[in-house]
Image (cartoon, grey):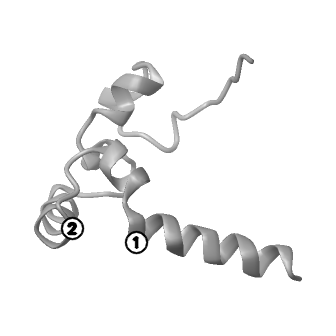
Amino acid sequence: MAVSADLDKQLDKAYENLTVAEVLDAPVAALAGVSECDAEKLAAAFGIKTVRDLGTNNFFRLAAALVEIDQSAK
């Protein structure tokens, strides 16, 4: 199944034309709004270095799932 998404506003300019796989392997600071300082803190606290690490982190996945459960209950 082909999926299309415009990620220009969600990514820093340097990462806008990459494939999804390339973005997932990019540093967390590739995400718009995540600074290098933020990325350093995520690495120190959770070992998160890439967008893929962030997306697969158990703490963040649990938090996202809890939000989904709450929203679907409303």
Mark 2 closeness class: few <14, some 14–19, many ≥20 residues within 10 Å? some
Image position of 38 (left or right of 14): left
Question: Residue at (19%, 50%) from the top-left corner?
Answer: 49
Kindly indicate the quadrant of the structure image that contains residue 27. Answer: top left
Q: Can you identify the residue that label 1 sits on?
A: 59
Q: Is residue 53 left or right of residue 48?
A: right
12 or 56, nearer to the observer: 56
| N-term mark: 2 or 1 | 2
Q: Residue at x 62, y 30 (%)?
A: 6
For the residues bearing labels 2 and 1, Cβ distance under 8 angstroms:
yes
Q: Residue beneath label 2, please?
A: 46
In the displayed structure, 8 sits above or below 51; it is above
User: Who is closer to the viewer here, 63 or 4?
Assistant: 63
Where's residue 16, x and y in %?
42, 27
Instruction: Tell me which amino acid carries mark 2.
Output: Phe
Residue 68 in the image, given as x and y percentages of width and height:
71, 70
**Secondary-structure class at tag 1:** helix
Quadrant into which the N terminus falls: top right
**Judging from the image, what secondary structure is the residue with disc 2 in?**
helix
Furthest-front residue in view?
58
Quadrant in the picture for residue 4 = top right
- Location of residue 3 in the rendering, given as x and y in whole percent from the top left corner: 70, 23
Query: Can you say whether 6 is above or below 51 in the image?
Result: above
Choose between 41 and 6: the one closer to the eye. 41
Q: Residues within 10 Å of mark 1 (few under 14, many from 20)?
A: few
Q: Is residue 40 left or right of residue 18?
A: left
**Residue drawn 37% across and 60% down?**
57
Residue beneath the point at 78% across and 76% down:
71
Residue 74 position by quadrant:
bottom right
